[in-house]
Image: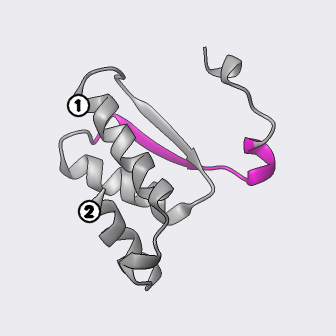
Amino acid sequence: MDEARRFIANETDRSEDFIEKTDTALVGLAAQLLDTTAAETIILLTTDKPAGRAAEALLSNHGFSDQIEYRYASEDYLETITAAEFQ
């Protein structure tokens, strides 16, 4: 999560202190799911482009290059989907 915070801060030209914890938590959760083999692949839908790029870059650096994909999604779209659609 620290790496994700630094990545996002560098990409957005903001201080690490102003990076939302939820953005870095998404990257951390994806790493944990892949590391424990709870998931074989992850598609991260987010409205936060820097967080998505951080997930792809950092997880690729840690050996999960073919297992993570980031897709930008609008807030309107994210508000319409349900968990049932992913089962």
The secondary structure type at the circle numbered 2 is helix
Q: Is residue 87 above or below residue 53?
A: above
Circle on res. 3: 2
What is the residue that sits farthest to the left in this orientation?
62
Q: Which residue occupies 34% across, 46% down?
A: 28
Q: Nearer the viewer, residue 21 or 83?
A: 21
First to last magenta residue range: 65-78
N-terminal of the two: label 2 or label 1?
2
Q: Quadrant of the N terminus?
A: bottom left
The secondary structure type at the circle numbered 1 is helix
Q: Which residue occupies 38% across, 49% down?
A: 27
The percent position of residue 66, horizontal first and vertical second, equals: 31, 36
Indicate whether residue 75 is drawn in magenta: yes
Indicate whether residue 84 is drawn in magenta: no
**What's the CA distance linking mark 2 and mark 1?**
16 Å
Q: Look at mark 1 in the image and give the residue it sits on.
A: 35
Amino acid type at mark 2: Glu
Q: Which residue occupies 66% across, 23% down?
A: 83
